[in-house]
Image: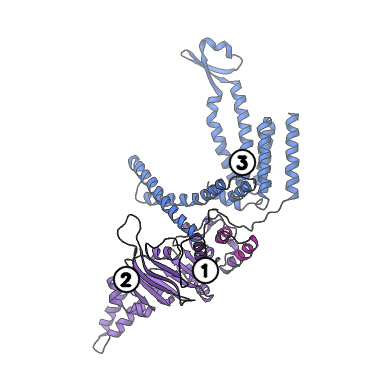
Amino acid sequence: MHLWLDNLSYNNRLRQLPPEHKLGFALVGLTIALISHPPVQIAIALWMSVWIVGYARIPFNIYGGMLSLAIGFWVTSIPALLISGVAVSARASIQADALSGLTIGSYYLYLSYQGFVQAGLIFARTLATVSCLYFVLFTTPFTELLQVLRRIGCPVVLTELLLLMYRFIFLLLSTARELWIAQQSRNGYRTRQRWIYSLSLLIRQLFQKTMKHYQQFVLSTAARGFNGQFRVWSSQSYQASQRYTLEASLGCLVLVIGNFLF
Amino acid sequence: MSQWLVEFQDVYYTYPGTNQPAIANLTLRIPQGKRCAVIGQNGCGKTTLFLLANGLYKPQQGGICYGGKRINYNRNSLIELRQQVGLVFQNPEQQLIASTVEEDISYGLCNLGLSGKAISKRVPQVLDQFELTSFAKKPVHQLSLGQKKLVSLAGVMVLQPSLLLLDEPTAYLDPLHTRQLAQTLATIHTEGTTILMATHDLEWVDRWADWVFVLNRGKLLLEGTPKDVFTQGDLLNKVKLSIPLRFQLSSLLDEVNQSTTIEQLKTKILQILD
């Protein structure tokens, strides 16, 4: 997880909404996206974008960048979906599906109509589901998601582990960055051989530092009276918005009805 | 209540896998209500002394008394001891464990089993005291190092300890944050907390401390007021510790007599400043 994503989740216009509401909304959107037709899925993606960019005020270039990451994965799967191959002798069986093609030796490679349809379906579904996921990531701090998980009965040991991982991932990233800069400043990555050697050193150092941090962490928690359960207090209060609740409910209803119409 | 808040009585401690003791038959008494400093070279046992005082390590020989009573290493006694003896580590990254500032400050109180009402009253007070109210809901990893140091101190002071142990509190701090820390510590001390600080900053010790301990190889080499300690130049030089500028100049002026020329004086002053 990147620091900027964390910053945005703490400083967006939907921060004051109860995390349960936001998580519930995204889950409903996700469920509809999984069972609906492509036009509805595209509508979900557009609608979530309005929530993310319009209501939460997440900069469009950041949201677009994150979306393009997901689209990038989709693009890499396109060749496998669009291009099919059969033996030349079986060419007649795919006549209806082949849009165009060429013969290479005893094989016939062709662009598949079904492949195009499949790619379109995957694109719509990817866009819809990913936008629901991004809605949660951009508008809800990770720690609030953990609080929701706790409230709905997720095992404490799991939420505590996730919390500590979240807290220390930033420490690990900054340590890795410091080490990398220190190596770069001494031309540690100049050649391919040095690159591999420096990377191995970096990993070893990270491991050693992680162990040291762990030992210090055990001491510091004990010094503050750790008694087997990681408990903290928060004064964070949330304000449910009637307008957003109404809009989300009506929107979901329209999407469900739209699914029956298409 | 004894005039000594904590007493180390012939304490011995060796880390597993090493032959050299980190603390070797140390007898040391921390006076109540004073601002104390521990100085010494790296590896002289300062941090181990703190970990022993907080009950995190148990002496292999000897014993430690808190408030005149020998520390009992059972669970309940340790919980009580760790509330009374607050320990602030050198690197705040290793001390801050919750995700936001107020959550981290509340951590020790939650461990004590206080009610939500009591915690909700105490945390804002401490946030206010340390001028951290505007950061209350900020994620810890977004703070500057100076702010992290302050939060780690606030997280300990929220427990209202009677002894505050500070391991290298001025390390990594710029002059502005160092001054802020000095003011905060002055307030804490005025409110009745005994402070014991490990530091390499001898100028700070000279300005700040009421009582100084000099450790060498896990043993107490010297103790007394800054004046008592820093006038023992020869002894401090033997353990490779320098002397604050004020005492070096004072010692130089003691050597001045009628035959000393301005040029000689100038050379000596430049030698000190080097």
Q: Quadrant of the C terminus of chain B?
A: bottom left
Q: Residue A4 at what x, y percent from top left?
A: 55, 50
Q: Can residue B6 be seen in this view?
A: yes
Residue at 75%, 38% in the rendered image: A253
Front residue of B6/A242: it is B6
On the question of residue B201 being in view, the answer is no
Q: How far apart are marks 3 and 2 (CA)?
A: 59 Å
Kindly identify which residue carries mark 2: B241
Q: Which amino acid does label 1 sit on?
A: Pro
Q: In which quarter of the image is residue B102?
A: bottom right
In percent of width and height, residue A29 lies at 68, 38
User: Which chain did the image draw in purple?
Assistant: B
Question: What residue is rendered at 67% in x and 53% in y?
Answer: A16
Name the front one of labels 3 and 2: 2
Q: Give the range drawn in magenta.
A: B100-124
Instruction: Name the residue beneath numbered marker 1.
Output: B161
Please tell me which residue lies in front, B222 or B186: B222
Query: Which mark is drawn over residue A133?
Result: 3
- Residue, far top: A89
| Chain letter of disc 3 in the image | A
